[in-house]
Image (cartoon, rainbow, N blue to C red):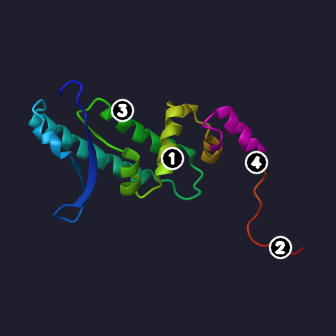
Amino acid sequence: MTPGIRVAVNMQPQRDENGHVIFRAALPMGVWFEKSLDKHELETARGELEQNYRALVETLRELLPRQHSGDVMRYWRLGDAITEFENGTANALVFVDKLSEHLARDVEYSRTMLDLARRFRQNFPDAAQVDQKISFDAYHRSGFDLERARAYERAKPPKRPRGRPRKK
């Protein structure tokens, strides 16, 4: 890799000849005229990034939380996949510019929720640190602080039954 140079790319969804969605890393035009960059190295890095990004999108689609599933570890795994991808491209020649925006589009999930899942994972690097009895909402509303999340859970009023009250 050329020392000190990193190239930001945008991921573009496209369809292959079989109709499957693939992702192409769109490189800035000026990069091809940069004499200090090895074109073969750039193409290799681009291909690796496209494969890794596709794998990330597929993983995230499988992990998307089902509405009100109550599985706090699903959010941790979502954040873990994003964090691992970021760590894997931290020193790479090419990286995805505005990763959260691309993922929100390609995974069809809220950018805010993807960012929250990522922050959750960063605050709890080990899955064993996560108390699975506490909701993701409690973690997020408490700034991802375990003790504050526990206090938030204890302070929540009990759930009321939905619908109209029954006659006695």
Main SS of residues in magenta:
helix
Q: Residue furthest right?
A: 168
* Mark in front: 3 vs 1: 3
Q: Would you say 115 lies left or right of 133 here?
A: left
Towards the viewer: 70 or 146: 146
User: For mark 3, does the 10 Å Cα neighbourhood hold few (<14), some (14 to 19), or many (20 or more) residues?
Assistant: few
Considering only vertical position in the picture, is 14 above or below 34? below
Rendering coords of residue 112 (x, y %)? 50, 50
Q: Residues within 10 Å of mark 1 (few under 14, many from 20)?
A: some
Specify the amino acid type for callout 3: Asn
The residue at which mark 1 appears reads as: 74
The mark found on residue 83 in the picture is: none
Residue 109: name its quadrant: bottom left
**Number of numbered tags placed on the structure image:** 4
Earlier in the chain: of badge 2 and badge 4, it is 4
Q: Do the residues bearing badges 2 and 1 touch, measured as CB atoms within 8 Å?
A: no
Residue assigned mark 2: 166
* Circle nearer the N terminus (3, 2): 3
